[in-house]
Each structure stands twice: as C-alpha cells, then as structure tokens.
Amino acid sequence: MKTDREFLNAIYEKAKILEEKKINTRKKRNSFLQLSSIAALLILIPLVSFKDQILKPGPGKVNEIEPHEIRMFIMDHEEYFSQADYIAIGEEVGIEAGKVNIEIQRSFLGDINGLIELDQQEGFGSKRVLLFLKGDGKTYSLLNEDSYFIEIGEDVFQDRLGNSLNIQDIEDKFRRSF
C-alpha cells in the first residue's frame, strides 16, 4: 500500500495533468475561434466592397425594366369645347414667317373655312389636325399649347398626352350641348 504522502502526490499529479489538458483545450478553442473569425472577415470584406457589382444586373439582361414615359390624362375635354371660339379639322399646308397655314376641311364650331394662318412657330408634324382655336375671325391661335389633336387613324385624333377623340365624339358633344 501507498503511504498518505504518495497517495496525495499521485492526486496532485493527476490534477496537474487534467489542468494542463484543460488549458490546451482552451488554447485550441481560442485559436480555432480566431482563425474562423479571420476567415469570415476575409470572405465578407470583398463581398461587401463589391456588392454593387455582384448584385447589380448587367446590361442587356432579359428582365431589365425600361423606364416608361410618364403621362397625364385629361379624360374629359369639356374645357376645350367650352372655351374655344372655333373647333375645326384642317390640313397643314405650310409654314411661313412664324405662321402655320391650315386649310380648313370641316368646321364644328364657328364660321371658319378656307385657308387660315395660325400664330404658331412650329408645325404639327401631321397633315390633318383637330384644332381648338380662339380668334376674332381674322387672326387665330390655339387655346393653349395642348389644344390640338393629330390624326392617327381615319377620323381619329390624339393629343400629345395620348387622349383620343373621333368625329363621332365631337358631334355627340354638340348634340348634347345645343
């Protein structure tokens, strides 16, 4: 049998060995955490710095959304009908000295026919136009810069905002108002 001193020495030695194992395990765990943290940073830093290039779709992708023209709609053109002195369909025949020459083909409101000159710098870019005019019988001008409709089909006219009128709509408005 062992003496008390030998027994205690054996216990102290076992405790010392267990303590060294515990310290080695902590060192290993700490070094593993440090290395994994460094590895994570090495992966995340380039991803964060290049995220715009990685996440941004490249040019020419199929699912790329094109910007659309923003358009306002005036669904009822009653203000044109109530404010106009003349409503007519005409054909642009030329531009001279800051005036657009229009040959009136059909008049809906006001006694207007023949060739008239509009006080306007630019033409309409179309042969037939529906015009909402103000004037005194000798000089004519548009109510405002949007008060004309360009012919897009047979007897169908469209303004710059995409609103459409046809001859039947115009005749119906006059039948209801008079």
Image (cartoon, rainbow, N blue to C red):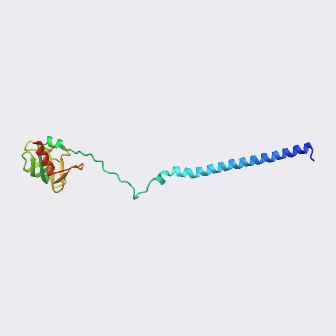
On the image, the x and y values in percent for residue 50 come to: 50, 52
Identify the residue at the far front of this view. 1
Residue 82 x/y as whole percent: 14, 41
Q: Is residue 118 left or right of residue 34?
A: left
Q: Position of residue 78 (x, y in %)?
A: 17, 42
Residue occupying image coordinates x 93% and y 44%: 3
Instruction: Tell me, yes or no, if residue 40 can be seen here.
Output: yes
Quadrant including the C terminus: top left
Return the residue nearer the eye: 173 or 120: 173
On the rendered structure, is 17 left or right of 115?
right
Res. 140 in view:
no
In this rendering, would 132 be left or right of 5?
left
Q: Is residue 63 left or right of residue 24?
A: left
Q: How many marks?
A: 0
Residue at x 25% of width, y 46% of height: 73
Residue 112 percent across, percent down from the top left: 7, 47
The answer to which image quadrant residue 153 occupies is bottom left
